[in-house]
């Protein structure tokens, strides 16, 4: 069943089309997205013990989102492969609205990423995933165009901090001049980001099993220097490429695309929380 959004909300969603939108090809889809930040606690058997939404939302959005989160089911949480009593973590929810006609939109939770998660075991303090920080930025991607574009980049990093590989997972065009081709802009920015970021160095906290670790970062190309599009709780109209897993990704690796980017720099997919049921359902 499609969700009919109240008239005032529909007006809020009816943002102007992006300049040059008629130039887009079928490889870029037009959608409305909203980011919602919150916290969650998952019990040992995988049910949601509690959650909190930190982003201000109107009741017509908060109510169905709260209900959906309460029904999520996780794989039993672990730390280093061992079961724990509970997992507590921060989350970013990607909400998508797809227009069906002049008055109706279909709302769904497209994805959720868990960051800064901690696990708890009996009589022991919480443990967090391994920290990764940027040690050096040897070069920065550049693009001379009148456009606001966000590219999500996934790093594959060895335990010593060297980049084994880096790949774009998604490109979102938020605004572009009529003379610019958005598809070409995405391809160019993804290529320039790979060239620049593959030479970066990282600090990786000691520990783990000696295997490579992943971290995601959003690269924002802005014609006006603004990054307000990253702010949660606001609808934004975007034209985006399909999500593409990194070449080294496993089938059950978390999805991390442009809707999952935060202002905090690097983000790590957290393997201790694995959502098995609840994503993609219409609200």
Image (cartoon, helix red, strand yellow):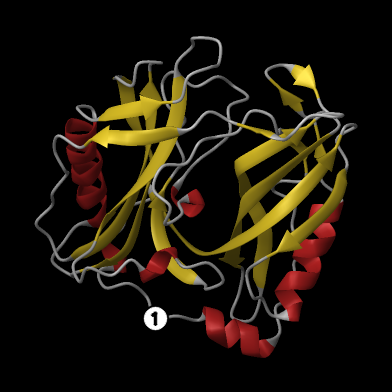
Quadrant position of residue 121 = top right
Residue located farthest toward the left when viewing the structure as drawn:
144
- Residue at disc 1, secondary structure: loop
Q: Quadrant of the C terminus?
A: bottom right
Mark 1 crowd level (few <14, some 14–19, many ≥20, 10 Å Cα)? few
Instruction: Say above or below: 143 vs 199.
Output: below
Nearest the camera: 35 or 157?
157
Q: Is residue 38 left or right of residue 161?
A: right
Q: Residue at x 21, y 45 (%)?
A: 189
Instruction: Say above or below: 150 vs 16.
Output: above
Instruction: Say above or below: 174 vs 249.
Output: below
Q: Residue at x 63, y 28 (%)?
A: 271
Q: Quadrant of the N terminus?
A: bottom right
Instruction: Say above or below: 82 vs 63.
Output: above
Quadrant position of residue 76 = top right
Q: In the rendering, at what x and y percent does residue 202 appear?
A: 32, 28
Q: Is residue 280 left or right of residue 250?
A: right
Q: Is residue 38 left or right of residue 136?
A: right
Q: In the rendering, at what x and y percent does residue 251 appear?
A: 59, 22
Does residue 96 show up? no
Labels in figure, total: 1
Name the residue carrying label 1: 16
Q: Residue at x 80, y 63 (%)?
A: 66
Does residue 7 show up? yes
Q: Is residue 101 left or right of residue 137?
A: right
Residue located farthest toward the bottom when viewing the structure as drawn:
8
Q: In the rendering, at what x and y percent does residue 125 appear?
A: 74, 34
Nearest the camera: 70 or 272?
272
Nearest the camera: 42 or 20?
42
Q: In the rendering, at what x and y percent does residue 169 appear?
A: 40, 37
Q: Residue at x 22, y 39 (%)?
A: 193
């Amino acid at each position: 069943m499609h969700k009919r959004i109240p008239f005032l909300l529909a007006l809020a969603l009816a943002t102007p089309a992006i300049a040059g939108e008629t130039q887009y090809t079928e490889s870029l889809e037009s959608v409305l997205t909203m980011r919602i930040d919150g916290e969650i606690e998952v019990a040992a058997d995988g049910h949601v013990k509690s959650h909190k939404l930190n982003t201000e939302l109107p009741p017509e959005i908060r109510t169905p989102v709260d209900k959906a989160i309460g029904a999520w089911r996780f794989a039993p949480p672990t730390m280093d492969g061992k079961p724990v009593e509970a997992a507590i973590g921060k989350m970013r929810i990607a909400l998508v609205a797809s227009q069906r006609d002049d008055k109706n939109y279909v709302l769904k939770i497209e994805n959720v990423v868990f960051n800064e998660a901690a696990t708890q075991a009996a009589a022991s303090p919480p443990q967090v995933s391994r920290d990764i920080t940027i040690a050096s930025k040897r070069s920065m991607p550049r693009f001379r165009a009148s456009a606001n574009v966000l590219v999500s980049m996934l790093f594959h990093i060895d335990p010593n901090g060297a980049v084994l590989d880096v790949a774009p997972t998604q490109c979102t065009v938020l605004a572009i001049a009529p003379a610019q081709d958005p598809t070409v802009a995405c391809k160019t920015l993804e290529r320039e980001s790979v060239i620049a970021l593959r030479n970066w160095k990282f600090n990786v906290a000691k520990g783990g099993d000696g295997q490579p670790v992943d971290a995601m970062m959003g690269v924002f190309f802005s014609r006006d220097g603004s990054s307000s599009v990253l702010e949660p709780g606001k609808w934004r109209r975007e034209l985006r490429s399909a999500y593409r897993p990194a070449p080294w990704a496993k089938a059950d690796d978390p999805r991390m695309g442009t809707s999952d980017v935060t202002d905090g720099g690097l983000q790590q997919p957290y393997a201790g929380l694995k959502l098995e049921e609840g994503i993609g359902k219409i609200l």
